[in-house]
Amino acid sequence: MDRPRGNGHMRQPTLIPASGHPTLPHNALRRSAPSPRRESGVVLVISLIVLVALTLAGIALVRSTDTGNLISGNMAFRMAALQAVDTGVETAFSSITGSSGFAATPTIEKTITTGKYSPVLLADTAPSDGIPDLDWSGVPGTDVSGNTVRWIVERMCSDNVSAPSDLEARCSVVPNALTMSFKQGELTPSANALSVAYRVTIRVEGPKNTIVMSQSVITM
């Protein structure tokens, strides 16, 4: 029999089975077994992470789809406004070249139901971008497929002159060509040596604050 050592406790004898190998205590086997409660906690954390990732991916997909639809809608509005520009150009051209159009009385400022005419170039200061300083709300507008078309015609002159000798000095002119084409009912090209240029500025206002600006130059 073993004698007590140290603090007086007896050392536990080691049982050796018939096979010759020592057996482990029951508490050692119990400690090495995995804890089911701990495993269930890890699975819960992983599930939450996957759920959050899937939620973020879904939100990103919805936002990208909404952005694509918004861009497509804005492009459609812009294309419709660009098509309405052609209507403004044709109307302004007829208002200049008609038998009683602006070119017939070029020194008189006029406002008609579809647009406005100035015998001189308007100021361009805020900002200097080639677009005349103008309160567009005061320019008559025409509805074209849901777009409001406004235009103004400016005779490209620094002063309101009419004498041929002054036109070359004060206006943008080009050599006149008697062979240029014209529509029936419009003024025929003049026999003067010079033709004066007219600048047409068109502004189209569409849905969702869509604004398109365009300019053309016509000589007459």
Image: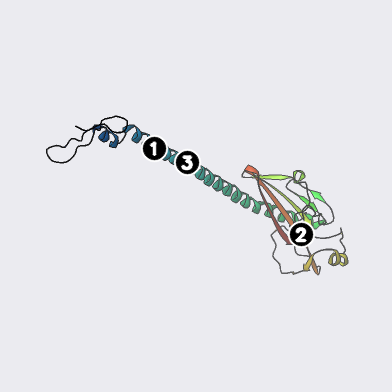
Q: Position of residue 141 (x, y in %)?
A: 71, 45
Q: What crowding class fits label 1: few (fewer than 14 Cα within 10 Å), some (14-19), or many (20 or more)?
A: few
Q: Amino acid at mark 1?
A: Ser
Above/below status of 86 relative to 2: below
- Secondary structure under the numbered disc 1 in the rendered image: helix
Q: How is the image coloured?
A: rainbow
Classify residue 82 as left or right of residue 8.
right
What residue is pinned by disc 2? 198
What residue is pinned by disc 3? 56
Q: Position of residue 161 (x, y in %)?
A: 87, 60
Q: How many marks?
A: 3
Q: Is there any visible trace of residue 98 in the rendered image?
A: no
Q: Amino acid at mark 2?
A: Tyr
Mark 1–mark 2 Cα distance, whole angstroms, equals 72 Å
Q: Which mark is nearer the camera, 3 or 2?
A: 3
Q: Is there any visible trace of residue 42 in the rendered image?
A: yes
Mark 3–mark 2 Cα distance, whole angstroms, equals 58 Å
Q: Which mark is nearer the camera, 3 or 1?
A: 1
Mark 3–mark 1 Cα distance, whole angstroms, equals 14 Å
Q: Residue at x 39, y 39 (%)?
A: 46
Q: Residue at x 73, y 60 (%)?
A: 217
Numbered circle sitting on residue 47: 1
Q: Position of residue 8 (x, y in %)?
A: 29, 29
Tell which residue pokes out farthest to the left in this image: 18
